[in-house]
Image (spheres, coloured by chain):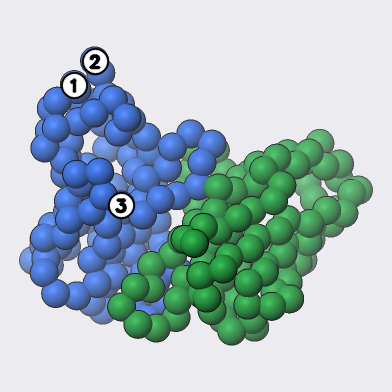
Chain colours: A blue, B green
Amino acid sequence: AQSVTQLGSHVSVSEGALVLLRCNYSSSVPPYLFWYVQYPNQGLQLLLKYTTGATLVKGINGFEAEFKKSETSFHLTKPSAHMSDAAEYFCAVSPSGNTGKLIFGQGTTLQVKP
Amino acid sequence: DTEVTQTPKHLVMGMTNKKSLKCEQHMGHRAMYWYKQKAKKPPELMFVYSYEKLSINESVPSRFSPECPNSSLLNLHLHALQPEDSALYLCASSQLSGVNTEAFFGQGTRLTVV
């Protein structure tokens, strides 16, 4: 069975600092991996995805993630945090072929301090 | 148009009421999904429709009844709910094949059962 583990339920950074949100997955087949962001009382917005090909994936709002098969990781980074980045971040995995059937990690709350 | 529209945004219902949640997309997606999200938790898949047919029911109680009248619409009929069913209900849609098969989420319906 596939699963996702997000290390750290709460991450706090200063504005302008590096953002690093950790995600490890478990999958018996090549996974499709996603990062979604959720602002308070909102739905989920896709930040970026990995399906095949280049392992360094660039997304919206300056975020990127690197797929490392040897480490079964898909960590999300952003060089410089903005106050507007404060939100809940979910890493998710899907079985091949149906990328709307998602298994989510527990989520990481990102706090950005001025 | 890359939107998934959910109505209503908020719903309060009694345990003996019958109500429906609605979801609409005009992206030509042939898969639609219902997710349930409790506070401070990740979304959990409830139902999947593929080509307007129910393909996955994640052991959801029968007081939740999904319906897909056409390829653009998805309903969730609610009857005799319990207070523990209070949650954010998210609708999503995706393509079933091709390069861009990621899920697009609506803003959700915040349901309170009293």
Identify which amino acid the numbered label 1 is placed on.
Ser
Report the Cα–Cα distance between label 2 and label 3.
23 Å
B37 to the left or right of A50: right
Q: Name which of mark 1 and mark 3 comes first in the sequence.
A: 1
**Mark 1 neighbour density, 10 Å: few (under 14) some (14–19) many (20 or more):** some
Identify which amino acid the numbered label 3 is placed on.
Leu
Are the residues at dot 2 and dot 1 in contact (C-beta closer than 8 Å)? Answer: yes
Q: Secondary structure at mark 3?
A: strand
Q: Nearer the viewer, residue B86 or B31?
A: B31
Callouts 2 and 3 on one subunit: yes
Q: Nearer the viewer, residue B27 or A109?
A: B27
Q: Residue at x 35, y 82 (%)?
A: B98
**Mark 3 neighbour density, 10 Å: few (under 14) some (14–19) many (20 or more):** many
Q: Is residue A42 above or below residue A64?
A: above
Report x, y in % for residue A32: 29, 70
**Which numbered mark, 1 or 3, is in the foreground of this view?**
3
Report x, y in % for residue A16: 14, 25
Report the Cα–Cα distance between label 1 and label 3.
21 Å
Q: Which mark is residue A114?
A: 2
Report the Cα–Cα distance between label 2 and label 1.
6 Å
Provide the residue designation for mark 1. Answer: A14
Report x, y in % for residue A111: 30, 26
